[in-house]
């Protein structure tokens, strides 16, 4: 039987491709959008990580979600530095969640409050993605908008406390494989992971509508 980590990976593969090839992501990574679109995306991430991380303290002692809560993953301080760089010191004044972002953050918070297994699905979808494809996005962003390498503007993608991301991801997959959840609960987590991908795609769709290419 497949391990849980490969099950969750395979199950979300199709949606990963959908998110990766969304119009907004393709335009962003293709260098066809201005830094304003990048900043707007970063603002949306702030709401998602606020939901993931403001609830993490409470979940740290939970038998299912607790092992996944690792301070070296926390992205909120880095996001806030990026936003100060992108939007200026008053970045909080202009912060505004798209309806799709609000729905995503609400679902994360709901899971954090009521269903630790669901929280793990959201945790996996974001953090393992950031440790993987996030590095491609960082590289493109640095080149396209001239941010300093691993500096302000792209700190969200830089995990300063994780020296070896490949090893970290291996450890993370081991945690997934050892999760204390029965077969039915594992299926529910996989389903929530698919939902997490869909929520990301919804945000990309909304951003795509806000930043259509004029050409
Ligand atoms: C243009 C955007 C993206 C690119 C280029 C990209 C690229 C990648 C690559 C190359 C990997 C494989 C890393 C490995 O095998 O260790 C990966 C894994 C992953 N990505 Fe993405 N990705 C993108 C967007 C996303 C999005 C939007 C999400 C969800 C929010 C996401 C979630 C994940 C997850 C959860 C994994 C880990 C899969 C696993 O090994 O279990 N990615 N990504």
Image (cartoon, grey):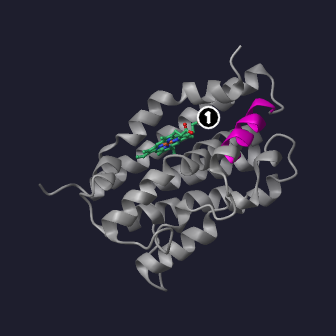
The quadrant holding residue 125 is: top right
Residue under pointer 1: 192
Which residue is depicted at the point 62% across and 66% down?
76
Which residue is depicted at the point 42% across and 78% down?
87
Which residue is depicted at the point 76% across and 42% down?
116
Give 47 or 151, whichever is nearer the viewer: 151
- Residue 20 vertical position relative to residue 158 in the rendered view, above or below: above
The quadrant holding residue 167 is: top right
Work out which quarter of the rendered image holds the C terminus and state it.
bottom left
Residue 30: x %, y % from top left: 28, 52
Work out which quarter of the rendered image holds the N terminus and state it.
top right
Q: Is residue 115 visible?
A: no
* Label 1 residue SS: helix
Q: In this view, does 78 lie to the left or right of 61?
A: left
Which residue is depicted at the point 74% across and 50% down?
113
Furthest-left residue in this view: 215
Q: In this view, does 67 lie to the left or right of 149?
A: right
Residue 100: x %, y % from top left: 45, 51
Give 95 or 124, whichever is nearer the viewer: 124
- Residue 8 vertical position relative to residue 151 in the rendered view, above or below: above
In the rendered structure, which segment of residues is drawn in magenta? 168-178
Furthest-top residue in this view: 1
Residue 117: x %, y % from top left: 74, 37
- Residue 150 vertical position relative to residue 176 in the rendered view, above or below: below
Residue 190: x %, y % from top left: 63, 29
Label 1: how many residues lie within 10 Å, few (<14), some (14-19) or many (20+)? Answer: many
Q: In this view, does 59 lie to the left or right of 188?
A: right
């Amino acid at each position: 039987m497949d391990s849980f980590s490969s099950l969750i990976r395979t199950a979300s593969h199709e949606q990963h491709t959908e998110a990766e090839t969304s119009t907004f992501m393709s335009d962003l990574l293709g260098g066809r959008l201005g830094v304003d679109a990048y900043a707007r995306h970063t603002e949306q991430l702030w709401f998602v990580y606020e939901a993931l991380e403001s609830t993490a303290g409470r979940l740290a002692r939970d038998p299912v979600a607790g092992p996944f809560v690792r301070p070296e993953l926390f992205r909120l301080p880095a996001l806030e530095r990026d936003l100060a760089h992108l939007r200026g010191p008053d970045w909080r004044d202009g912060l505004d969640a798209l309806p799709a972002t609000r729905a995503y953050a609400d679902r994360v918070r709901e899971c954090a409050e009521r269903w630790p297994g669901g929280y793990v699905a959201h945790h996996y979808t974001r953090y393992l993605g950031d440790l993987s494809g996030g590095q491609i996005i960082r590289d493109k962003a640095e080149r396209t908008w001239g941010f300093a390498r691993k500096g302000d503007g792209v700190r969200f993608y830089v995990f300063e406390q994780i020296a070896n991301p490949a090893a970290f991801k291996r450890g993370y997959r081991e945690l997934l494989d050892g999760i204390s959840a029965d077969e039915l609960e594992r299926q529910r987590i996989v389903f929530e992971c698919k939902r997490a991908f869909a929520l990301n795609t919804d945000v990309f769709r909304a951003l795509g509508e806000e930043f259509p290419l004029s050409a």
